[in-house]
Amino acid sequence: RSVNLVKSTSTIERPVGSVAEIAQRVLPSVVSIEAQASGGGATGSGFVIDSSGYILTNNHVIAASVTSGGDITVRLNDGSAYDAKVVGRDSSYDLAVLKIVGASLKALQFGDSDKVAVGDSVIAIGSPLGLTGTVTLGIISAKDRAVTAGESSSENSFINALQTDAAINPGNSGGPLVDATGSVIGVNSAIASLGSSFNSQTGSIGLGFAIPINQARKTADQLIKNGKATYPVMGISVDMNFSGEGAMIAKTAQAIVPGGPAAKAGMRSGDIITEIDGRPITSPDELIVTIRSLSVGDRVVVTYKRGSESKSATLTLTASK
């Protein structure tokens, strides 16, 4: 019998702005990170922010390695590996900057996370479960989510996060979330877990969170210049167990820092903060996230309740000690 199999000679068009084109452009600047620690190790992702060898990632990816004196290896998309030095890390924002030497690198372009809108298309790139160079597609599901991240209570991070339904899994941490132009708008950092109340179901449930790049850029600049970063504060301690609406200043003698912004504005222990610059505050976590999303020196209007009376005060945020 004679059989003629038809071979197609058509080519697939991948126009500028398509997912395939963006992935090909961004992937060479995304790295996987292997951080050795005494209790094992951790893997994560990162991306090049400066062609001289600076790489941005999450602090929780390398924290255990740093404290135990382990080695950190950065593996590029072409498979080549380099020893990395920690330039600086900050647990408050869950960010760290690494430096490698000798590689030919191209930095990713930063976008503007303040201009992101719910519904915008995004692409997450990283090494989930050690599978390097993985690309997933989704949208921005929500903005300004108050998210607590980090892997230990002593190094919790409070993130004013971008929420996305792009599939993000363990190992994506530190990788870029890019927009439809290929510009970085976030650093993938956390995923929601169903937990025991949902019969311990696992897997991607479409709830991933990224640190907005405008915040990450400020912190990365500080880490590169100073080796450490600061964050803005009101000069108060918050009662994290308060379950009512708003955030209560703790009822302790040390709750108001003497000479701090809140003290100068006449705020007292037991005051319940309900708004910052018109943004509703519904929990202690939300207050911390809102303040940390601002900058040192910013002036904010704080609305609070003292008993049944509603008050407001204008504060100038100062740097954390």
Image (cartoon, helix red, strand yellow):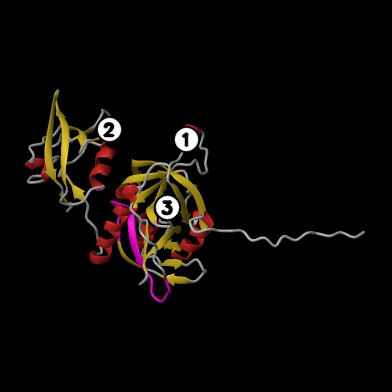
Taking the view exactly as shown, the residue that stands out farthest to the right is 1
Residue at the spot of label 1:
196
In the visual, does 135 lie left or right of 236?
right
Residue that extends furthest to the bottom in the rendered view of this protein: 102
Residue type at tag 2: Thr
Vertical position of residue 25 compared to residue 135: above or below: below
The magenta stretch spans which residues? 89-105
Amino acid carrying label 3: it is Asp
Residue 115 on the magenta span: no
Query: Mark 2 packing: few (<14 Cα in 10 Å), some, or many (20+)?
Result: some
Disc 3 target residue: 179
Report whether residue 12 is seen.
Answer: yes
Q: Residue at x 37, y 70 (%)?
A: 51
Sequence-first disc among 1 and 3? 3
Q: Single out the mark in the foreground, 1 or 3.
A: 3
Three-letter amino acid code at the position of disc 1: Ser
**Mark 2 in CB contact with mark 3 (< 8 angstroms):** no
Number of the label disc, if any, that sits on residue 4:
none
**Residue 282 shows which numbered tag?**
2
Q: Report x, y in % for residue 305.
A: 16, 29
Which is more toward the observer, 30 or 170?
Answer: 30
Residue drawn at point x = 49 percent, y = 40 percent: 205
Tell me which residue sits at (75%, 61%) in the image. 7
In what element is the residue under mark 2? Answer: loop
Spatial separation of the CA atoms under disc 1 and disc 3 = 34 Å
**Residue 184 x %, y %:** 39, 56
